[in-house]
Image (tube, rainbow, N blue to C red):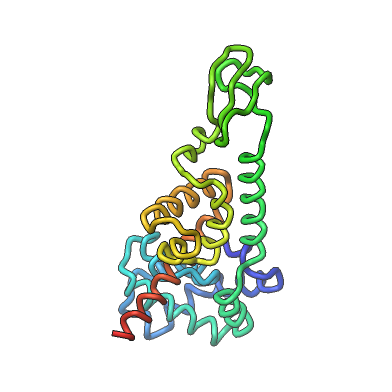
């Protein structure tokens, strides 16, 4: 997982750290009360790609506080034993990984091609003698005279305003909240939440798992930051 996110020059340091981690944890007094020790080894790859504590907690069935304590200790060990790797992880938190940028571009290209296609084989008889009808992505087969919508396969036929889908994906990659998406795109907060769920599911379904995980993690981190700002202003 971390190999696709971390810079290549940090892979050796990451491998070295993960190999040493069981011994480092066993000898660290801060870890004595945080058992099982194996959980540190499981969480470490997530720390290496700067995943938020809420996502770690969900993945391993622990509380966010428990994830925070273990993540902090792993970061302390990183800073002590692999300082350059630790700095690379800190940099990850403020930049978008190249693999995420690439997957976002590929996902948007796939979606754009789907929306703009003018030829689509019939879902019923497989004939290519089809014609696009209406402003939505609807087709009529001239062979069997049936109509179909290829968006149904991806459950996108339930989403409106398809001209806003690509801008929405850009906002998801930035980790914007549903309220911000509502403000920037002019859709309701409920619609923004529905779109977020659909697109993140579709990213994973189409093979862009890293992009989907990144959008989830980024959004949770941004939501937490927004919540802190609101709380501090009260």
Q: Going 47% across and 72% down the picture, which residue do you hit?
A: 22
Q: Nearer the viewer, residue 227 or 165?
A: 165
Q: Is residue 70 left or right of residue 127?
A: left
Residue at the far right in the pictured view: 9
Whether 77 is drawn above or below 137: the answer is below
Q: Nearer the viewer, residue 106 or 181?
A: 181
Camera sees residue 131: yes
Residue at the far front in the pictured view: 134
Camera sees residue 214: no
Q: Quadrant of the C terminus?
A: bottom left
* Residue 159 at x, y percent in the picture: 46, 43
* Residue 205 at x, y percent in the picture: 52, 44
Q: Is residue 211 left or right of residue 159?
A: right
Q: Going 51% across and 46% down the picture, which residue do you hit?
A: 202
Q: Quadrant of the N terminus?
A: bottom right
Residue at the far top in the pictured view: 144
* Residue 114 at x, y percent in the picture: 62, 39
Q: Going 57% across and 77% down the picture, which residue do you hit?
A: 94
Q: Nearer the viewer, residue 122 or 135?
A: 135
Whether 175 is drawn above or below 27: the answer is above
* Residue 182 at x, y percent in the picture: 43, 61
Whether 234 is drawn above or below 103: the answer is below
Q: Going 38% across and 81% down the picture, which residue do you hit?
A: 229
């Amino acid at each position: 997982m971390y190999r696709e996110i971390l810079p290549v020059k940090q892979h050796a340091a990451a491998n070295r750290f993960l190999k040493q981690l069981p011994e480092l944890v066993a000898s660290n007094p801060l870890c004595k009360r945080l058992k099982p020790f194996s959980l540190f080894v499981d969480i470490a790859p997530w720390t290496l790609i700067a995943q938020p504590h809420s996502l770690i907690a969900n993945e391993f069935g622990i509380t966010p506080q428990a994830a925070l304590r273990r993540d902090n200790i792993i970061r302390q060990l990183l800073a002590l034993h692999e300082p350059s790797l630790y700095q690379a992880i800190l940099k990850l938190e403020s930049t978008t990984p190249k693999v995420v940028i690439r997957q976002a571009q590929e996902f948007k290209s796939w979606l754009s091609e789907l929306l703009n296609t003018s030829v689509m084989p019939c879902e019923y008889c497989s004939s290519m003698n089809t014609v696009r009808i209406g402003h939505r992505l609807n087709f009529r087969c001239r062979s069997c005279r049936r109509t179909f919508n290829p968006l149904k396969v991806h459950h996108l036929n339930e989403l409106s305003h398809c001209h806003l889908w690509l801008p929405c994906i850009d906002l998801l990659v930035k980790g914007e909240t549903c309220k911000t998406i509502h403000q920037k795109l002019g859709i309701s907060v409920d619609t923004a939440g529905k779109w977020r769920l659909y697109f993140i599911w579709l990213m994973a379904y189409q093979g862009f798992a890293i992009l989907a995980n990144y959008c989830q993690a980024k959004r949770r981190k941004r939501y937490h930051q927004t919540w802190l700002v609101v709380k501090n202003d009260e």
